[in-house]
Image: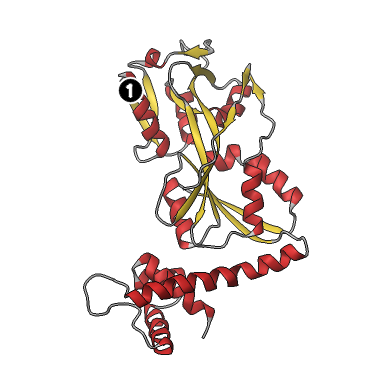
Amino acid sequence: MHVESFKVFCDLVETASFSRAAEINAVTQSAVSQMVRALEKRFRVHLIERGRKNFSVTPEGRAFLLAAREILRAYEGLGDRLRELSHVVAGPLRIAAIPSVGLHDLPPYLKKYRALYPDVDLSVEYRRSTQVYSEILDGSADLGLVAYPQRRRGVVVESFWEDRMVLICPPGHRLAERRRVRLTEIQGERFISFEPDLPTRKALDRSFRAAGLTVRRVMELDSVETVKRAVEVENGLSIVPETCVANELRAGLLAAAEIEDADMWRPLGVIYRRQRPVSAAQRHFVQLLKQPLPGQTVSGFQCVRRPRAAKAA
């Protein structure tokens, strides 16, 4: 019996879908069915209910699932344990990150991590928030980096930092010379917004509602990079993470102001799949993320972050 059969069964139960389990493991649906039947024949039990409209697992199947997870944890962690005995942190580490974090918050950590652990094959892919969660769940990424992390089934969340959100505008705007503004001062202004499904947009909408604020949304865009460009071109305003506009402030392309009267801090979190062994490469990366790195001062602004209370969900 191959250990792959245990993984296929776990994926089948977690997804409740033969087609999804087949896709995750790069096999056919027929192969998934054959593996499950082979397990049932070997242990002389029924693991899943057949002939029903909804997918369901038998009591024996639930017991088998717990045992299969233990087997997989031991198997998948074996190589890592052997490397740790020789004091080597190595192996693949696949990170999925939303662009604003991956492009602006992550680079100094990547540089330091690669210097500390050169034997780790580290790769980073940039994804929308929903895709990050999906890739963690299907195993195509080991760690995910998101803003406004959410509790989801099958996912562990650890918070590490909060970025300050600032108001940005073109240099010629009436608020360009201000270092601090009140949120109500942008009432009725042309506002470049994030798309409605993005976590940052949802957080800003909550702040606007709490302040009784209405803005004129002239665009809804899907990333910080496009929002910044639109603010330059459209002579509008937006609210973005301060770390994401350091280059534009330095070049004089944008101006920024701290928002005084609202909680304008964006929490960042690292996520990984529950019930999956955490490798030494993953563990050391998460530990590094929780360490402060030097900030930077741009156009009179100290780009500020603050530690966030670490909570596992």
Name the residue located 62 percent from the left edge and 55 percent from the top edge.
Answer: 282
Name the residue located 31 percent from the left edge and 24 percent from the top edge.
Answer: 209
What amino acid is found at the position of numbered circle 1 in the picture? Answer: Ala
184 over 135 or under it: above or below: above
The percent position of residue 113, horizontal first and vertical second, equals 70, 48
The percent position of residue 192, horizontal first and vertical second, equals 40, 27
Name the residue located 62 percent from the left edge and 60 percent from the top edge.
Answer: 279
- Quadrant location of residue 187? top left
Question: Tag 1: Cα neighbours inside 10 Å, few (<14), some, or many (≥20)?
Answer: few
Front residue of this view, candidates 232 and 30:
30
Name the secondary structure under disc 1: helix
Colour mapping: secondary structure
193 over 39 or under it: above or below: above
Residue under numbered circle 1:
210
Front residue of this view, candidates 249 and 165:
165
Q: Is residue 142 visible?
A: yes
